Image (tube, rainbow, N blue to C red):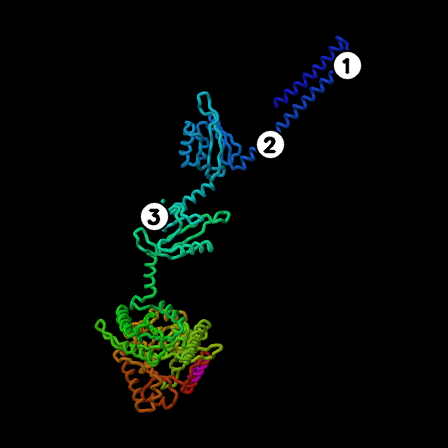
Amino acid sequence: MKKIKIIKYILLLASLATAYSASAFESSFNLNLNALVVSVCAIMSLVVVYLLTIVHSLKRSHSQLQLSEKRLKSTVEGSGDTLWDWNIKTGKVIRINDKYVMNSNNLVEFPPNKSLIHPRDLTHVDYLLKKHFAEESTFFEATYRIKDSFGKWHWVLDRGKIIEKDANLSPLRMTGTVRDISQLKSTEDRLNLFAKCVESLTDALAIYDKDFRLVDINPSFLTLFGGVREQYLKKEFHLAGYDKSYIESIKNTVRKHEHIQEEVKLRNSDHALLPFEISIDEIKNAQNQITNYVVVYSDLTERKKTESELNNLSNIDRTTSLPNRNLFFSDLQKLAKQHSHHALLVFDLDNFKKINDSLGHQLGDSLLAKLAMRLNKLTRENDVFYRLGGDEFALVMSNTNDILTITRMAKQFLAAIATPFKMAGHELAITSSVGIVLFPEDGNTPEILLKNADTAMYHAKKKGNSYLFFNDTMNRQAVKRLQIENLMRFGLKEDHFEVYYQPKMNIRTGKLAGMEALVRFITPKKGVISPGVFIPIAEETGQIIEIGEVVLNKACRDVKQWLDAGLFNARVAVNLSAKQFSLPDLTSRIDVILQKNELPSYFLELEITEGTVMDDPQEAIAIMRSLSARGIHLAMDDFGTGYSSLAYLKQFPLNTLKVDKAFIDDMKTERGRNMVDSIVTIAHNLDLHVVAEGVEQASQISILEELNCETLQGYYYSKPLSKDEFTAFLKQQQSQSKLSLIRATS
């Protein structure tokens, strides 16, 4: 700007001089005007040319300056650095770009931008800056955290130098750069973390170069194998005790697959031979070139010990010390792969639950342990005896299908089991049944063999304390049983269980005295399935509990409807299975059903078989008293077919005794008639009501009337009726009663 002003001043002077010169010459000397004009024009032309040259030069310089400034700014911004210029005397900081460095006009603030530096880093920055001011360092260089304009912290590298001092050598001016190193710092922290992790690894670690020469090891390597670091460096990879060909095969595998994992045995610093797992991995650079190999040595001593203990826990039964179910399947799979014959004997103990319940599980476990020892002594050298769980055992006889040998072993087992055990003052006699299958004739997998053996055992139980070989007939029966089980499961879900009612008639009046609720299983495709078929299976599977609740609920619902309609005013008898009777919450379940259907307990009678109550008479008495206290009547069903004790019978809070159909059918003989007479007499002596089941003939009614039996039930009066049929029956009974009443009054 100053140069432009000078040029303007020169041009003004030139104009004035020209004007003055022209006037002087014209007045004083009167020279030739044309000659003068030519001279002046020539001079003016030179001056103008000169001035234009200067202006052009100035413009070019200004453009170059702007370009240089632009390039400098671009370079600084491209480098990621922030340039700063600190006037130490005034405290003012000038910067080219202000990403992190802020202006500071506080003369007292030291270091500059003190308020933006992280409090934890401030002391360090102050120290390094003062050190540079004291000329103890050529440059000021510090890494610290600084806050940006958004309040976010960044790690920066700050470098600077004093470039101007006063006469007393005090710093006047300092310049430098600030660079954001947050990413580098993060990377550095990660590297430090990884380094610490490697050093703290309990596993030994060694790093090799691309030629498998040792570069470095961690402290655990020296702890494990001993020695000092220097003795291992630059040594080739090797495994003490293994030949060179094995080492080369490991290297080749790593080069081919980038990884290998092997179990080896190496000596530690105490020269003890220990199991190790070595794991080798390739390390590649950004160009996918192999730079290193990392080898990790993991001591497997504790793991092997734990595996052994776990193997014992998972494969050995703790009670009997026999191989367990897991090992049974594993061994059987191995045998199945052999091209030879084997036999599998499976058995469980009859009524073992009673021993557990009456004498305690501890004595039961002791009995199983003694039994295992007794039977294990009978086995051949290559046979293996297993406990499959609970009171179920299996014997695998390998390399034989000789029937004589197998049956001899089965008989020996049955005899040994039946031999009484003397324990805790008790002499315990138990029995069993054995199911036998042959491999490969009866199955070629462990699962099929065990299933077929269980099927054979199931049929052997029907004979009692015997053995039985599996065959196709048994298999067909097992399949049918499974189909029924599945049908019941589906039937419960889809409500295929219906309740039918068989009337109970007063023998004197011929009027309805009550009825029994009987379950009927009616399937869409298979039709009606006999109770004799599905009930035993339901009892075994436990489905009888759910079926029983369905029957009880529907019976209570129907009776409530008949009561409300004025068609019925007696009790409905519902059978209670053994599994239902043993439920700990039986009474509360019955309460819920009665409350749900709003049926008073007076109208409900529960029929219990004598076998059910005699399993545990004392417990049965407690349950029956609880039910009786609710106003529910109790009947003993099928009396005389089991093993009732008269001593217990008089303690049971019963209301009714039912005479089984088998006795009714046998009344045509004098002995049979006397048997029924005895049962009725006993019932009356105990103040119990008597119901005769299965009455089909008029002659039977005459005899029962003579014997003072009160109530009859059977096909003579009616078959079991559906809900709708029984409603019609009730209406018919009501009509007959009204007709009888009219006749009596007329």
Q: Quadrant of the C terminus?
A: bottom left
The residue mark sitting in front, 1 or 3, is 3
Tell me which residue sits at (35%, 77%) in the image.
Answer: 607
Q: Is residue 705 magenta?
A: no
Measured Cα–Cα span from mark 2 to mark 1: 49 Å
Identify the mark nearer the N-term, 2 or 3: 2
Can residue 578 be seen in this snapshot?
no
Measured Cα–Cα span from mark 1 to mark 3: 109 Å
Q: Secondary structure at mark 1?
A: helix
Which residue is identified by label 1?
Answer: 35
Which residue is identified by label 2?
Answer: 67
Can residue 201 be seen in this snapshot?
yes
Count of labels in the image: 3
| Residue nearest the viewer, comparing 121 with 742 | 121
| Residue nearest the viewer, comparing 223 with 86 | 223
Residue 52's spot in the image, x, y percent? 68, 23
Which residue is identified by label 3?
Answer: 222
Tell me which residue sits at (45%, 72%) in the image.
Answer: 490
| Residue nearest the viewer, comparing 185 with 266 | 266
Under mark 1, the amino acid is: Ala
